[in-house]
Image: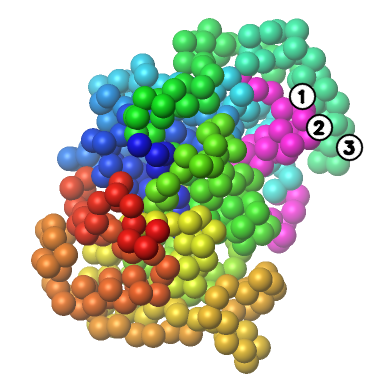
Amino acid sequence: MPAVVIIGAQWGDEGKGKATDLLAEHIDYVVKFNGGNNAGHTVVIGNEKYALHLLPSGILTPGVTPVISNGVVIDLSVLFQEIEALNARGIDTSKLRVSANAHIITPYNVIVDKVSERFLGKRAIGTTGRGIGPTYADKINRVGIRVQDLYDESILRQKVEGALVAKNNLLTKVYNRAAIRVDEVVAELLGYAERLRPMVADTALELHTALDENKVVLFEGGQATMLDVDHGTYPFVTSSNSTAGGASTGSGIGPGEFKTVIGIVKAYTTRVGAGPFPTELFDENGEFLRATGFEFGTTTGRPRRCGWYDAPIARYSARINGVTDFVLTKLDVLTGLKEIPVCVAYEVNGKRFDEMPVSQSDFHHAKPIYENFPGWSEDITGCRTFADLPKNAQDYIVALEKISGARISAIGVGPGRDAIIVRHDMLAPSVGR
């Protein structure tokens, strides 16, 4: 069985955890391959709601081996807080595997993130202040701390000392903050070493072996396509590759293994933080989507910016990721709207763009060109087949499928684990691919 990738096809918060949960009975491994605790998945099982920030959502499914691979940056305090919280609720976390090559978010990464973002003022990017970006910067600058460094105190101390030379100069001379002591950082990190040791593994080798044994390995992306550091709305992006290509570099699995790519889209669009957002709503419709969809960040609690569905973004994501199947979530949120606009193209300085402009300046000034679809008033949360949906809801989905670049194989109609309609088998090859 080839590897399966699940990615967000908008700006995040699309409901990737729900898609993972849908496939859980077929899956042997679930891998988090990018990001850190700057994004979250919310999964509802029965009457229980689980908010996960660093752990892959597959950890909630008995029998599945959850993996944090090399492309992730790990705040060890957050990792153990999440593990403890799940253990207290009866969830077995003993199978968790952590890559020895994953980078660690140090206390100084968090401090630098917060003070530098504050220093930017109106030019702030809108980071979560959790040290994600500075940790990736350390990785690229080759001064990062990896999980394996916890088991060689001499190497760990040398690396922390090297990293703090520049950072303490920055903190004291630019930001007027106190210097960070090497001993304190080393002691804090070493305090996690023995507790973490049983989880540390050569995860790339373990995943290769699993694939060779015909096991199903699902790669669960953090954030989303439009936040990818290369392909997103730069500079208002995350610091990692959150597209399907990141699953290969972020795990050590060759790109030829990935045959199924599942893109998650909401039936409307949201984003958190600064940056361009052509369909953003500032009226009662935006408030309706936010309130009805409970659009507040799983990790930050920040209210999400809300807007109508953007088909050019869906097509862009389908191309960038090689999407074979879309999962459309939160269709139920649109219930009660008399009319539902969908962005089908943009207008920039009098010129029509049917696809995303290559220039970020153009995209920033893009105005949506809408096509309107009739809404529905019937409660759809109990629907379990496509035929159960009201005719207008069916027409809306069919229309989105035609303009989004890939088939819509599943539809979320409520927050519950079983509140989903399956149209196609996503583990089977997509038509025409």
Q: Tell which circle, 1 or 2, labels the residue nearer the N-terminal end.
A: 2
Residue identified by numbered label 3: 173
Location of residue 342 by image quarter = bottom left
Q: Magenta segment: does it hold 203?
A: no
Residue identified by numbered label 1: 180
Question: Residue at image x 17%, y 40%?
Answer: 46
| Label disc, if present, on residue 88 of the rendered structure | none
Whether tag 1 and tag 2 are in contact, CB under 8 A, the answer is yes
Residue 297 visible in the displayed image: no
Location of residue 398 by image quarter = bottom left
Question: Residue at image x 44%, y 23%?
Answer: 209
Residue 145: percent from the left, percent from the top? 69, 23
Q: Residues within 10 Å of mark 3 (few under 14, many from 20)?
A: few
Q: Secondary structure at mark 2?
A: helix
Is 91 placed above or below 199 here? below
Residue stretch in magenta: 118-147
- The foreground one among 58 and 306 is 58
Is 222 placed above or below 111 here? below
Give the residue furthest to the bottom: 350
Question: Residue at image x 51%, y 42%?
Answer: 256
Q: Secondary structure at mark 1?
A: loop
Count the labels in the image: 3
Residue 202: percent from the left, percent from the top? 54, 19
Location of residue 28 by image quarter = top left
| Label disc, if present, on residue 167 of the rendered structure | 2
The amino acid at mark 1 is: Ile
The amino acid at mark 2 is: Lys
